Amino acid sequence: MNKIAVVTGATSGIGKAVVELLLKENIHVVGLGRNIEKIESAMKEFAHLTDEANLDFVLGDLSDTRQTNLAGQAIVDFVNEKYDGKIDILMNIAGIVSSGLHLNEDGNEVTFAINHLAVFLMTYHMIPLLKKSDDPRILVVSSLSHYWASINWKNIQSKKFYNILKSYKRSKLYNVFFVKEFSKRYHDIKIYAIDPGLVKTELGLKRTNRLAHIIWNSKMNKGKNPLYPAGFMVHVATQEKYLTLSGHYIKKGISIESSKVSYSPEDARKLWEYSEELTNIKFKY
Ligand SMILES: NC(=O)c1ccc[n+]([C@@H]2O[C@H](COP(=O)([O-])OP(=O)(O)OC[C@H]3O[C@@H](n4cnc5c(N)ncnc54)[C@H](OP(=O)(O)O)[C@@H]3O)[C@@H](O)[C@H]2O)c1
């Protein structure tokens, strides 16, 4: 029987490469995309890989709580209908970097909202589907940049003295906290923080200013093809050897130490509770 994977950020960069490799492994994919043209283009591009595996997309946006709830519910409805309410893999890949301070409809800073809160909320929606699998796994794409992030409870969303890099790094530290805390709370669903390394994508060109474009373009020349981290991600999502590594930070398929601050259980718990408050949900165990 084919496994079933939900992938956010499935229409470009690392997420799109993951979709390609999942299909090559005969894993059915339900991608989340926010742009209909990009969805149609991915469907076309990967049509030749859909003899043994299905590729479907759900249209949805992760910018704020209301929209993420809608996207999560749309995926649940789709999976209930097509796959009897079961998925095996959730890949939380969607993410942004943003020049300047922008608040979403909830008043949350957008990098914090999309990179952390949407991961939190999407995972919450997918739990009942994952619980039906006999080998459920979640991957969350963090980043090397989290090593340079600190936590400041007086400025948790980086709204004060906003800085593009500070906000991004923090959001990626929060991904690591979330993975560690989730692994403590859920033992039957395995979860991993992924460090993809520097990858050649358009991440730094989408919500950023001219200066950021120049910096990103020069950095990107040294970045790997998105298929490179995607290959390791598919291994983490499927290979048996990762079953004992839930909660770990994984780079190139190998478990490595995350940053010192990411090991604070108090901060991980506090962030979890703060995120529950902001999204108005309560995880059930
Ligand atoms: N590239 C790197 O060097 C690098 C390094 C470390 C970590 N990462 C992480 O890897 C992940 C993927 O990034 P990438 O480099 O592959 O960049 P990317 O190509 O820009 O991919 C980001 C994905 O997120 C989606 N997305 C953004 N905002 C969204 C929203 N509001 N609602 C729904 N989807 C949204 C994008 O949709 P569209 O296709 O419509 O734009 C895109 O598919 C991110 O979490 C990033 O932080 C990247």
Image (spheres, helix red, strand yellow):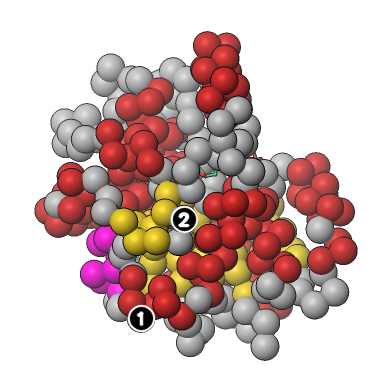
Percent across and percent down for residue 49 are 82, 66
Image quarter of the C terminus: bottom left
Could you classify mark 1 by the number of other residues whose Cα lies within 10 Å: few (under 14), some (14-19), or many (20 or more)? some
Which quadrant of the view contains residue 251? bottom left
Residue type at tag 2: Lys
Q: Position of residue 195 (x, y in %)?
A: 42, 49
x, y percent for residue 85 = 59, 80
Vertical side of 209 occupied by 276: above or below = below
Q: Nearer the viewer, residue 125 or 57?
A: 57
Q: Is residue 185 above or below residue 213?
A: below
Q: Describe the element under mark 1 as helix, strand or loop.
A: loop
Q: What residue is drawn where x is 38% and y is 25%?
A: 165
Which stretch is magenta?
Answer: 178-186
Which residue was labeled with disc 1? 188
The residue lying at 64 percent from left, 51 percent from top is 227
Q: Quadrant of the N terminus?
A: bottom right
- In this view, the residue in front, 31 or 212, is 212
| Pointer 2 residue | 252
Figure quadrant of residue 79: bottom right
Q: Residues within 10 Å of mark 2 (few under 14, many from 20)?
A: some
Chief secondary structure of the magenta span? helix
- Of the two numbered discs 1 and 2 in the rendering, the one whose residue sits closer to the viewer: 2
**Mark 1 within 8 Å of ligand 1, using the beta carbon:** no
Q: How many marks?
A: 2
Give the residue drawn at x 48%, y 67%.
236
Location of residue 156 by image quarter: top left
Queried whether the magenta region covers residue 185, the answer comes back as yes
Report the side of 80 relative to 181 (left or right).
right
Gap between marks 1 and 2 measured at Cα: 24 Å
The percent position of residue 47, horizontal first and vertical second, equals 86, 61
